[in-house]
Every structure is written in structure tokens, then in C-alpha cells.
Image (spheres, rainbow, N blue to C red):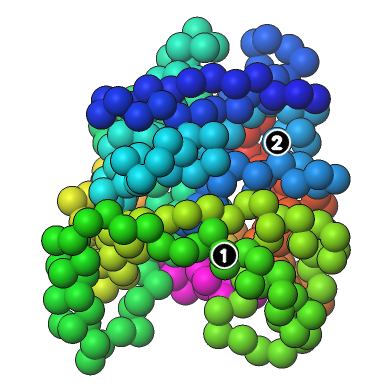
Amino acid sequence: MTPHRLVARTGDGVHLTVRHFPARKDRAPAVLVVHGFAQNHRAFDVPGRSLAHHLAEHGVHVFLGELRGRHASHRGAATLPHGFRHYVDEDAPAMLEAVTRHLGQERVMVLGHSMGGLICAALPERAARHVAARILLCPPYRFLDWLTVARRPLALWMRAVRAGLPLRLPTRMVGPALAAGRALLDLPLPTPLAVWAPGSVEPDMLEWALHHSFAWEAWRVLADLLELGATHGERAGRVPVGDRVRALEGPLLVLAANRDGLAPPRTVEPLYRAAGSREKEYRVLGRELRRGMGHLDAVMGKHAPAHVWPVLREFLRRVQ
């Protein structure tokens, strides 16, 4: 299946690429998928284990969004975000508008992984009216709740970073670096920032994903996300995340992974509890697996087709 390309134009003039994996029926449910920090759309379209192809084959129109500053949406340093607000208030609304216009529908569902889940949870009102339901997969909502002594120095550092230029983080090289240490990271040893559960992804698929699904990121986005953690989920730069989460409406599914070192369940569940949605559900994935489930393998691990993708399909079918 070859995806179709759509172009979404943001209010500040940036052109973004959205890939459409069509369902076999025209009048089928549709979902816009938003990737995470320093990632691109390829995390959902790994050869041999593509979530996008899987959902399309099960009767869902899938749209993979590409945030500014990476891959097909990259147009040089000028398109780097000036903070988390560019993703939330510009990119995601533009992609939603492009998708609904393309389908001729008023509303579609959204699915966000990691930072993409935070984006989907914090959409402004003008974009939220196009959202029929939300799936938030491993969103690191309160990942710095343990921080106490260093909170003031961190706040000063974040302010200094925002005052500077929108410099690029070398995150494109994180994937190859992880690939180089893959054998060590795949050992069943406790690590504080485990990206995947040991042995949860086949070596060839993991190697491909690490080399192709990582992208450049901006310092200001990192600073905003650190502020989100330091403020217990209240603010990320200019985005009032806490207020928007409490104002959420419509069906909501929040998923955490039990061996996720980047977004452990204790950082994800507070988003579910704070969300204003009356129809909401929270699950922890991987409890039935011997080695559990981590951040990356929740999307494209060997257990995802049997333990994660059916959960997504069922929710999309139920709320369509």
C-alpha cells in the first residue's frame, strides 16, 4: 500500500506533510497519528510491522502527521519550532484541518504517542472541535514529579534557553547511538531510561527504526517539556497544558506501558485523572508479558500486534 500525500499549511506559513493510508471503504473511521519528541512518522510505518498498514487493513483511514523540522516537513532551520506551542497551536490544528477537508468530515479521531499524546491532549479549542476521540499512548505528563531541590535552577535554565536562538538538538544521532549499544540495552538489566523492554523488538526491525525514525529537535521544545514536568503538568512554555487537559471532552483512552522508562505509569495516570472527559479509560499494557512492555515497543514491538493494536482498533470501532 502506497500512502497518498497531503500538504497542511500552518497559520505561520509552514508546509507540513501528512501521509494517508486509505481504508478500503470511503466512509470509514479516520485517525490522525502524531509522533513523539525527536521522532518522525516512520515510527508507525516500520517495514514488516506497520501500525498504519494494520489499521488501514482493518477499515480505518490512517493519517500520519509530520511535525515541522523533520523529514518531508523539513525546510531548513527556519522551520524549527520556537517551542511546544508551535506543535500544539500551529502544526496539529493545520493537520487536522487538512485531514477533515480531504475526507469531507467535520471530526476525526487522534492518536498520539509520547509527546504526540501531550499534543493531542493540549489542542486549542479551535482544533479540539475537529476531534471525535483521543488515544494517548505513553504520554509523559508528570515525568519530573520526583524533582524538588533542582526545580529553581531548572526554571532559570529554561528561561535562558528560550531567550536564545531556536538551536537544533543533535537528536537525529540518538537513534544510531542506541543502535550501536543495542546489544547491551537488550540485556534484561534494570535501566532508568529504558526505551524498549529487553528482547521486545526483533534486531532487524529495531535497527531500522533506530536509524530511520529519529529526527532533529529544538532546544526550546525540550525546555518547554522540562517546564511541563517541573510544574506538575500545568505549563509547557506558552501552552496552558493543565487547563486544556481539565477541559477535555469526548471519549478518551490513556495507555501506559508497565516497563516504560521514559513515561512510567506513575507519570501517565495523572493525565487520565485530571482529564475532564466523562467517557475515559486507563490501561497499563504489558502486565501479562514476562518482560513487560516499554516505550518504543508499545508501537512496533513483537507483542504490539497482539497486545496493543487490538486495543486501539476496538476503541476506534467503539467510538466511530
Residue located beneath label 1 in the image: 173
Q: Is residue 266 magenta?
A: yes
How many numbered discs? 2
Q: Which mark is residue 52?
A: 2
- Cα gap from disc 2 to disc 1, whole angstroms: 25 Å
Q: Residue at x 18, y 61 (%)?
A: 164
Question: To which quarter of the image does residue 160 belong?
Answer: bottom left
Question: To which quarter of the image does residue 307 belong?
Answer: bottom right
Q: How dense is the environment of label 2, judged by Cα within 10 Å: few (below 14), some, or many (20 and up)?
A: many
Q: Considering the numbered disc 1 on the image, is that residue within a helix, a strand or a loop?
A: helix
Viewer-nearest residue: 309 or 270: 309
Q: Residue at x 40, y 52 (%)?
A: 118
Where does the image place residue 135, in percent across and percent down from the top left?
Answer: 53, 44
Amino acid on which the number 1 mark rests in the picture: Met
Q: Is residue 299 magenta?
A: no
Question: To which quarter of the image does residue 181 belong?
Answer: bottom right
Where does the image place residue 309, in percent across and percent down from the top left?
Answer: 73, 46
Q: Is residue 235 rendered to the left or right of residue 290?
A: left
Rendered position, 135 above or below 207 = above
Rendered position, 133 above or below 271 = above
Q: CB under 8 Å between callouts 2 and 1?
A: no
